[in-house]
Amino acid sequence: MKKLIFIFALILIFRAGFAQEVLPLRTTGELDELKEKYKGKVVLYNFWATWCKPCVIEFPELVKLYNDYKSKGFELVFISLDMPEEVKLKLIPFLEKNKVDFLSYYSDFRDVSDLMNYFDKQWQGAIPSTYIYDRKGNLATGFIGNRDYEFFEKEIQKHLD
């Protein structure tokens, strides 16, 4: 019995290490708060979804980037465009599978164009879509389409020095 309890405790501890909290983003005011929270750091905002194959391919590259650079003033903010009702069924399991152990978000905007215009008035909603902000909170660059680790690393290093 003690062995069974020990194994159960290990499972809980392991899951707790990757227990994922995912919060909704509903307003541009919440986006302002998020940007303010990370001022002083280089921040990469990535818009993605579990149903988007290029997003899923790119995802582990971004997690690795975060783990390699988080101690150097880098933050990664995932904002999922999955439907809110898919958060528990699809989004959280995907994040846990990819060992995302930091707070992530999903879009719950009534009008998704408010979210898109906040980051880029030219953005038509294609994903993956990525925006990098410098330490002062200014947009440094943005791009659409999946990229690899080396590309992301090169882009964030420009602003980490």
Image (cartoon, grey):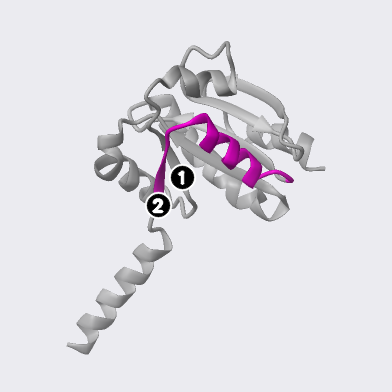
Give x and y (percent) for residue 43.
65, 39
Residue 43 lies, with reference to residue 51, above or below; the image says below
Toward the viewer: 110 or 159? Answer: 110
**The image quarter in which residue 77 lies:** top right
Give x and y (percent) for residue 83.
30, 30
Toward the viewer: 41 or 37? Answer: 37
Q: What residue type is labelled 2?
A: Glu
Q: Name the residue under label 2.
A: 21
Q: Name the residue under label 1.
A: 104
Toward the viewer: 154 or 138? Answer: 138
Q: Which amino acid does label 1 sit on?
A: Ser
Residue positioned most to the bottom: 2
Residue positioned most to the left: 1
Q: Which residue is drawn at 73% across and 35% down?
A: 134
What is the magenta range? 22-40
The N terminus, quarter of image: bottom left
Q: How far apart are marks 2 and 1 (CA)?
A: 7 Å
> Label 2: few (<14), some or many (≥20) within 10 Å?
some
Q: Which of marks 2 and 1 is nearer the N terminus?
A: 2
Toward the viewer: 133 or 26? Answer: 26
Residue positioned most to the right: 161
**The image quarter in which residue 119 lies:** top right
